[in-house]
Structures are given as structure tokens and as C-alpha cells.
Image (cartoon, rainbow, N blue to C red):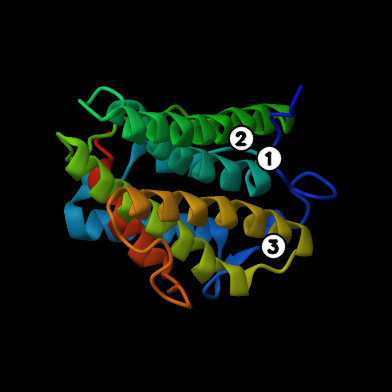
Amino acid sequence: MQSTKPIVPGSRGQGLASVEVHGMSRSSFILKSALAAGAVYGAAAVSPVVQQALAQDGGGDVEILNFALTLEYLEADFYRQAQELDLSAEVMELATLLGDHEQQHVDALTGTITDLGGTPVESPTFTFPMEDEASFLELAQTLEDTGVSAYNGAAPAIESTDVLAAAGSIVQIEARHAAAIRLQRGETPAPVAFDEALTDQAVLDAVQPFIQA
């Protein structure tokens, strides 16, 4: 039976607390991103889930994993909602497969947080502007591309080789997702030789509109 734990070589979560993104700690990144969202969208835009993640007594690994769990909730729910649309058989199969990948991530993160003595954050409510196959595929490409570029942006700041190896294994799957979506849209699966890297604020700007509460 396949393990439901995240793919992190070596000690679980070792070195995660030292991971920095563009010169700030992960906790500072989450806090500053939340404050930025409040400044741009108003206080109601600061997700209670982000606040809950920051409030975890354990901090460190649990805080980071809870933030990652929130993002995985978003992706899993996106593909779950997509399966309610009138999709072709081929696209439905793809949405189901990718959704299964994301749900496995959710399950693995939830189990790891519990094992570390933390409390997994609850899933917020998401909304996605899609009503048909075309709008689903367009948004799927945006989300998958954002995921790949987010890992690219964070990679130079990762100090732990274990975490870097784990991030590399995940970003490869995200890139394959993006390529599969492009093929469904009749586009070149790998249009460029080098992918861009997104800053933390750019990632926040990309996902914040989909979080309702």
C-alpha cells in the first residue's frame, strides 16, 4: 500500500523552519502576504485559514505544512468542482486524475501535521469562474503554471537539501499537469526552454481571488 506521507527524504520536515523566500522566513512570508491582501482587498480578504495557520502553537513545520495544505485544498477543490461540469470523456478523465493527485497531497499533509502534534487547518470555501470545458481548461492552465512558477521562485532560497529534493519531485508533477492541460487546449506542451519564477506576492495575487472564506 502506498504511503500517504509527503515525499520528504530524510527526517520528516528537517530544515523546513530555515526555509526562506526572498529574504524572509516562511512565517514572515505568510504574515506579510496576509497583510498585503488586507491592504489591497480589505480586511475581509485576509483568509481566516491563513490566520489559523499563523496561530498554530507549534509554529515551524506545522505552520508551513498548514499553509501548504490550504493551497492543496484549493487545487483539490478546483478539480472536484470541474467534475460537475459537462466535460468530454477525455477531459473528465484528466480532471479526475489530477484531482486525485491533489487529494493525495491533502491527505498526506493532513496526516503529517497530525503526526507532528498539530491541528490541520480547515478548508476554506473556494469559488472558480468556470462554466464549461473551455473555461475549466483555461483556469487549470493558469493554476498549474502558477504552481510551477511558485516552486521556481522559492527554490533559490531553500537551504535544506532534503526540502529542495522534495520540492523538485513535486514541481515535476506540476509541470506535467501543465503540459497535459496545454495538450488538451491544442497548444504546445512545452512552449519555452526556461520557465519563469514568481515572487511570493505574485503567487498570492494569483490565488487570493478564489478564496471566499
Name the residue tied to disc 1. 6
Q: Amino acid at mark 3?
A: Leu
Give the label on residue 83, or none.
none
Q: Identify the secondary structure beneath mark 3.
A: helix
In depth, the one of 102 and 180 nearer the eye is 180
Count the labels in the image: 3
Q: Residue 184 at what x, y percent from top left?
A: 32, 47
Marked residue nearer the N-terminal end (1 or 3): 1
Q: Identify the secondary structure beneath mark 2.
A: helix
Mark 1 burial class by Cα count in 10 Å: few <14, some 14-19, many 20+: some
In the rendered image, the vertical position of residue 161 relative to residue 135, given as above or below = below
In depth, the one of 164 and 144 nearer the eye is 144
Q: Amino acid at mark 1?
A: Pro
Name the residue tied to disc 2. 109
- Compute the Cα span from label 2 to label 1: 6 Å
Which residue corresponds to the image point at 63% horizontal and 41% vertical from the top-left? 62
Do labels 2 and 1 touch, CB within 8 Å? yes
Q: Amino acid at mark 2?
A: Leu
Q: Residue 100 at what x, y percent from top left?
A: 50, 29
Left or right of 200? Residue 206 is left
Image depth: mark 2 or mark 1 in front: 1
Q: Residue 186 at what x, y percent from top left?
A: 28, 55
- Compute the Cα span from label 1 to label 3: 13 Å
Which residue corresponds to the image point at 31% horizontal and 25% vertical from the top-left? 83
Name the residue tied to disc 3. 164
Quarter location, residue 3? top right
